[in-house]
Each structure stands twice: as C-alpha cells, then as structure tokens.
Image (cartoon, rainbow, N blue to C red):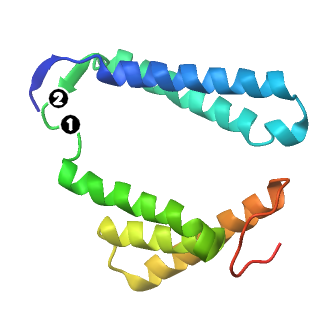
Amino acid sequence: MSVNKRDYGDLLVLVALAGFTLWYLLDAIRVSSAVQNLLLILPLSFVVLAIVVLEVGMRLKRGTLLVREESEGEPLHRTLPVVGLFAAYVISLETLGFDVATVLFIAAFLVLKGERHWLLLGGYSLAFGFGVAFFFAQMLPYPMHMLILQG
C-alpha cells in the first residue's frame, strides 16, 4: 500500500455531496415545510450530512483525506456491470413494478458480487425487496406501481 500523490477528488465529491444535500433540503423546506413533503427528505439529508462529516473526520484523523493509495478503488470492468444493472432496474420499474424489480435487482446484484448460496440469496432478496417496497408504498403520499403488493 504505497502512497502515490495528493488527490483532491474524494474531498471534492464529499463537499459536492454535502452542498447538494443542503441545497435540496433548503429548497424542499422553502417550497413546503409540510410533513408529507419532508418525510423522507429531512431524515435522509441528516444521514447524508452525518456520513460526510464522519468520513471527513475519519480521514483527517488517519491523515488520508488528500492522499490516494495505489490499491484504492475497484477496476472499471467490475464497476460497469453494476451501472448497467442499475440502469436495467430503473428501466424495468414501469414494467415489472417497484416490488418485483427491486427483488430482482437485489438478487442480480448479489450474484454479480459473488453470492452463490441460493437460499440466502433468495431469502434476503425477497425479504428486503418486498420490505422496502411495502415501506415506500405505505409512507409515500402517491401510488406506486406494484406487480404483487397491492397498496
């Protein structure tokens, strides 16, 4: 693990993420401070900002905030399939419904990342996928297209 050179990319991403999150939160509050509008935005914004602060703090403590290690990062040939899988997930939402598309996305992602235990893969995909779909269907104030779970 040898240190290569100074790198500001990670810090810029963290600052941009925090800035966008703050802008989006303040804009959402400006438009409407109703509970329904901020039900997901406010807690998620706090989580994102906490993660950014935690990451910057940990990197400052370790002295690795502006340092890129040579072994850091995943190769492009392992990242592109995940991007393609996510694109297929988003495109399939209208056809398959949020519930089935989410279950299939989770299962495919786990297979892509090397999971081979089919009982664990199927159980986790079904439980988490349908759980997330049910949660969002109950919490969001507008109907979501579902194939199996009906509102």
| Residue occupying the point 23% across, 46% down | 74
The quadrant of the picture occupied by the N terminus is top left
SS at circle 2? strand
Residue type at mark 1: give it: Glu
Please tell me which residue lies in front, 70 or 17: 17
Q: Are marks 2 and 1 in contact (CB under 8 Å)?
A: yes
Residue type at mark 2: give it: Glu
Kindly tell me whether residue 127 is visible in this rendering.
no
Residue 134: image location, x then y, percent: 74, 67
Q: How many marks?
A: 2
Quadrant in which residue 23 is drawn: top right
Q: Which residue is mark 2?
A: 69
Image check: 49 left or right of 11?
Answer: right
Above or below for 147 versus 30: below
Which labelled disc corresponds to residue 72?
1
* Residue at the right extreme, as displayed: 34
